[in-house]
């Protein structure tokens, strides 16, 4: 929910300063035109100001001040394509011109090119370290372009200067993304490793799936014995009322050595609550990535904790809404999203989150009512099309669901959930031959056997009995595995 670039105020000050400097060096006629252009800017008559600055730039092409003033006026008028062209010309002559870099970056954000914006704004922030508006724009551009480490650094600077609720919320989301990146890298490099298993166990525990968490912890301990994992297992046994098992785990933990911190590494930094140091520890080994993910999670928790200082902010309500949703407390989550929207009515990001939560809460008619106008406003957004299609499917409006689901698959071919939904909708409409390829493509996303089961039904309807039977068997295997992973805690 990053806000729009805040360059206009910066642009106004720069235009007035540069125009004054330019006017002092020109004949009286140009000086009067410069003064008139400044009056037009002050009156928000941007088109008139742009015309005058074009004339001044043409009259004195060697004066970079007029080009800056023209580009700034174009930026302030929202004529961003013209602004980046004009400011780009200036930057080719003066590549380290901080204000031009800042305004060009702001215009690129509004043009939907945050990656280009971030590069320009990084340079501007180095040249203008005291300008917090440039820092904020850099945080927005870096967040939007997935450069979360750059965004976090900028946001730390903002929050250190007494940041507001949006800055703390954005910092928390940046740390969450960095934690997820560390986990993804660990999953790619060492899937099934004890460190990977331990992280997944923590996730299951946060989801309230203590049985699955303990099962994963035991698997991790079978591969690597650690004090902290033993203590975590003991706590889970305590929760389950199995005091003897808990005591046995604590006794086993006590027999293990305490990690040495003679040369502090990621683990030692983490336990000393030096989370930034833990996250920055060099290396891509499984243990380093494990502590990096945990450290960024702690940093996110600390950032979100700061939001409690702003209890009436939309960001605080949005944080609470996400917290409730992660714990499957959907009604509470919906109430918080709606509270955030009373503060920021019409915010598309908040409305999207509300629609998704209503879908998860199985409040399908409400989800449809929220997402339908959003899907009309943003027709190229595959996620919105999927939410709309899913809401219609759940209301048994299968034929009506097919067009938005087809659009969701076209817009975002990598979204396996959309392919599964489209396959189900086509199946419900009796189009089994058309449903099969979509259901088959979605199989990698099947965790509980549901997609395999749907595919088996369509294959059976097409007379492909052997394939249908194979899919049915796989469906049953997945159902059994899913049930085992979420069952009650039992002794080893």
Image (cartoon, rainbow, N blue to C red):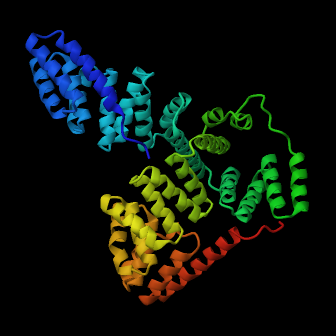
Measured along the vertical axis of the image, is residue 49 above or below residue 438? above
User: Image check: 397 left or right of 72?
Assistant: right
In the rendered view of the protein, which quadrant contains the C terminus? bottom right
User: Image check: 320 left or right of 239?
Assistant: left
Please report the residue visible at 51 percent of the width from the left and 34 percent of the height from the top. 155
Q: Position of residue 445 (x, y in %)?
A: 52, 66
Q: Nearer the viewer, residue 112 or 55?
A: 55
Q: Position of residue 460 (x, y in %)?
A: 47, 88
Please report the residue visible at 54 percent of the width from the left and 56 percent of the height from the top. 336
- Tell me the quarter of the picture where residue 324 sits: bottom right
Q: Nearer the viewer, residue 311 or 194?
A: 311
Q: Nearer the viewer, residue 294 or 266?
A: 294
Measured along the vertical axis of the image, is residue 430 above or below residue 86? below
Q: Position of residue 213 (x, y in %)?
A: 72, 60
Q: Nearer the viewer, residue 387 or 466?
A: 387
Report whether residue 440 is seen. Answer: no
Please report the residue visible at 69 percent of the width from the left and 68 percent of the height from the top. 485
- Tell me the quarter of the picture where residue 68 sits: top left
């Amino acid at each position: 929910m990053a806000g729009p670039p805040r360059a206009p105020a910066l642009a106004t000050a720069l235009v007035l300063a540069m125009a004054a400097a330019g006017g002092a060096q020109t004949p009286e006629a140009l000086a009067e035109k410069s003064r008139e252009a400044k009056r037009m800017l002050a009156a928000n008559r941007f088109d008139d100001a742009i015309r005058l600055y074009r004339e001044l730039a043409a009259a004195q092409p060697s004066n970079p001040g007029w080009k800056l003033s023209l580009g700034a006026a174009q930026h302030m008028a929202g004529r961003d394509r013209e602004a980046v062209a004009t400011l780009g010309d200036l930057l080719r002559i003066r590549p380290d011109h901080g204000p031009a870099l800042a305004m060009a970056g702001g215009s690129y954000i509004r043009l939907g090119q945050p990656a280009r914006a971030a590069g320009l704004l990084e340079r501007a922030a180095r040249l203008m370290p005291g300008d917090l508006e440039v820092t904020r724009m850099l945080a927005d551009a870096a967040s939007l372009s997935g450069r979360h480490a750059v965004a976090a650094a900028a946001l730390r600077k903002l929050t250190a200067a007494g940041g507001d609720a949006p800055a703390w919320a954005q910092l928390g989301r940046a740390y969450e993304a960095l934690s997820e990146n560390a986990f993804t890298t660990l999953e790619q490099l060492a899937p099934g490793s004890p460190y990977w298993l331990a992280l997944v166990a923590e996730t299951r525990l946060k989801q309230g799936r203590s049985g699955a968490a303990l099962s994963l912890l035991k698997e991790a301990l079978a591969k690597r014995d650690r004090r902290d994992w033993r203590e975590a297992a003991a706590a889970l046994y305590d929760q389950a009322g199995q005091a003897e098992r808990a005591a046995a785990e604590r006794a086993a933990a006590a027999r293990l050595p305490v990690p040495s911190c003679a040369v502090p590494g990621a683990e030692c930094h983490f336990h000393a609550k030096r989370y930034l140091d833990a996250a920055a520890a060099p290396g891509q080994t499984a243990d380093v990535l494990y502590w990096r993910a945990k450290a960024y999670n702690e940093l996110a928790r600390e950032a979100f904790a700061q939001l409690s200082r702003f209890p009436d902010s939309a960001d605080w309500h949005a944080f609470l809404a996400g917290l409730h949703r992660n714990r499957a407390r959907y009604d509470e989550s919906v109430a918080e999203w709606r509270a955030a929207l009373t503060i920021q009515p019409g915010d598309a990001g908040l409305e999207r989150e509300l629609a998704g939560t209503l879908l998860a809460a199985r409040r399908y008619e409400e989800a449809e009512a929220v997402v339908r106008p959003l899907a009309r406003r943003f027709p190229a957004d595959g996620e919105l099309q999927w939410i709309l299609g899913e809401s219609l499917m759940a209301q048994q409006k299968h034929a009506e669901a097919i067009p938005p689901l087809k659009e969701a698959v076209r817009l975002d071919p990598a979204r396996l959930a959309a392919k599964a939904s489209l396959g189900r909708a086509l199946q419900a409409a009796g189009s089994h031959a058309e449903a099969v390829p979509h259901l088959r493509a979605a199989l990698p996303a099947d965790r509980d056997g549901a997609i395999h089961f749907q595919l088996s039904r369509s294959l059976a309807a097409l007379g492909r009995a052997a394939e249908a039977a194979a899919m049915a068997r796989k469906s049953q295997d997945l159902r059994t595995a899913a049930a085992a992973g979420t069952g009650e805690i039992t002794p080893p």
